[in-house]
Image (spheres, helix red, strand yellow):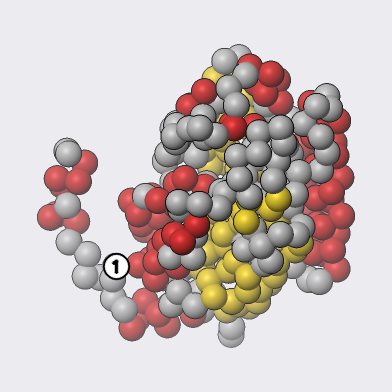
């Protein structure tokens, strides 16, 4: 029997001025996304992911401790608690990327995973942290992840998360595949320029190398006062053959959806035996260089 899943991605412009209070910023962005989540539910979406740190702007364009105050605990903070209620109401698996506080002064770029009955399943912490300014001062805000590459057994299948800059590293993408991921979401905040041509190259390559589905999310618009460039959207789904199933626009807030059959993973893996033909005993040098 086919394992058909309808999945969704939300790409969005920042909801208000960055001069507003942090509470106002969070509330405005959540309100904007709640409307899109309701739209997703009306279309029968079963699993959904938002963009990187969806409750605010991409504040890593500057280095100021103001944004430390926008962190939340996971799972006990207000956003995850709210999304548990929303997931349960809509019977929808939701991936919730937010700025996490573990303890005072220790902060992570994190995505919580909530099952369709509202159960908090766990979280992924971004492992690869860029610091390649001007405009991407992430080491000022985030400690590198320390939880490996978990895969979550959800109501729709096995879900993994890889956040933004992570996508440039094939090792974690492979680890997610070996850990059983069937759908990998990559919530991002990336602007036009040097890496734009990689946006539709790297992640389909991960999908092919590991024979899983990928959902890649990017925000849209130009965020002041930093104006580091245009967040160019084009969120998409691709299948285990690297074929694009749906792609969003470049410049507007929208819900991107695709329907696919998870049984395609078995079909592709039985054709391209990349996992069978791996030679891990020859790769020891990769962790020693």
Describe residue 163's horizontal placement relative to residue 155 as left or right. Answer: left
Describe residue 263's horizontal placement relative to residue 74 as left or right. Answer: left
The residue under label 1 is 275
**Who's the residue at 20% across and 46% down the image?**
286
Residue 25 shows in the view = yes
**Who's the residue at 49% across and 65% down the image?**
200
- Number of disc labels: 1
Describe residue 27's horizontal placement relative to residue 219 as left or right. Answer: right
Q: Is residue 103 above or below residue 59?
A: above
Quadrant of image for the N terminus: bottom right
Q: Nearer the viewer, residue 208 or 29?
A: 29
**Who's the residue at 33% across and 51% down the image?**
171
Element type at marker 1?
A: loop
- Crowding at dot 1, Cα within 10 Å, few <14 / some 14-19 / many 20+, comes out as some
Q: Nearer the viewer, residue 232 or 146?
A: 232
**Who's the residue at 15% across and 47% down the image?**
284
Residue 111: image x %, image y %? Answer: 60, 42
Quarter of the figure with residue 30: top right
Residue 101: image x %, image y %? Answer: 62, 24
Describe residue 217's horizontal placement relative to residue 172 as left or right. Answer: right
Residue 3 shows in the view = no
Q: Nearer the viewer, residue 71 or 251?
A: 251
Quarter of the figure with residue 100: top right
Quadrant of image for the C terminus: top left
Residue 287: image x %, image y %? Answer: 21, 41
Quarter of the figure with residue 257: bottom right
Q: Is residue 120 above or below residue 177?
A: above
């Amino acid at each position: 029997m086919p394992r058909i899943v309808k999945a969704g991605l939300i790409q969005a412009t920042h909801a208000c001025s960055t001069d507003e209070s942090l509470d106002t910023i969070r509330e405005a962005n959540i309100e904007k996304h709640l409307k899109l989540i309701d739209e997703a539910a009306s279309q029968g979406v079963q699993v959904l992911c938002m963009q990187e740190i969806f409750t605010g702007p991409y504040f890593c364009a500057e280095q100021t401790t103001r944004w430390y105050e926008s962190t939340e605990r996971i799972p006990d903070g207000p956003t995850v608690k709210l999304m548990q209620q929303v997931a349960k109401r809509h019977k929808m698996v939701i991936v919730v990327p937010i700025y996490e506080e573990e303890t005072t002064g220790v902060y992570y770029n994190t995505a919580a995973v909530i099952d369709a009955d509202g159960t908090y399943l766990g979280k992924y912490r971004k492992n690869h942290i860029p610091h390649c300014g001007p405009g991407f001062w992430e080491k000022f805000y985030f400690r590198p992840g320390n939880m490996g590459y978990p895969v979550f057994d959800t109501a729709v299948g096995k879900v993994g998360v890889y956040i933004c800059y992570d996508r440039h590293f094939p090792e974690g993408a492979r680890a997610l595949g070996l850990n059983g991921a069937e759908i990998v979401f990559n919530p991002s905040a990336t602007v036009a320029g040097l890496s734009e041509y990689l946006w539709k190259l790297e992640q389909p390559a991960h999908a092919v190398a590991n024979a899983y589905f990928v959902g890649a999310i990017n925000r849209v618009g130009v965020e002041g006062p930093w104006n580091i460039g245009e967040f160019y959207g084009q969120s998409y789904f691709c299948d285990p053959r690297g074929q694009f199933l749906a792609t969003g626009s470049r410049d507007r807030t929208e819900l991107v959806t695709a329907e696919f059959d998870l049984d395609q993973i078995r079909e592709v893996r039985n054709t391209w035996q990349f996992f069978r033909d791996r030679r891990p005993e020859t790769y020891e040098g990769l962790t020693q260089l």
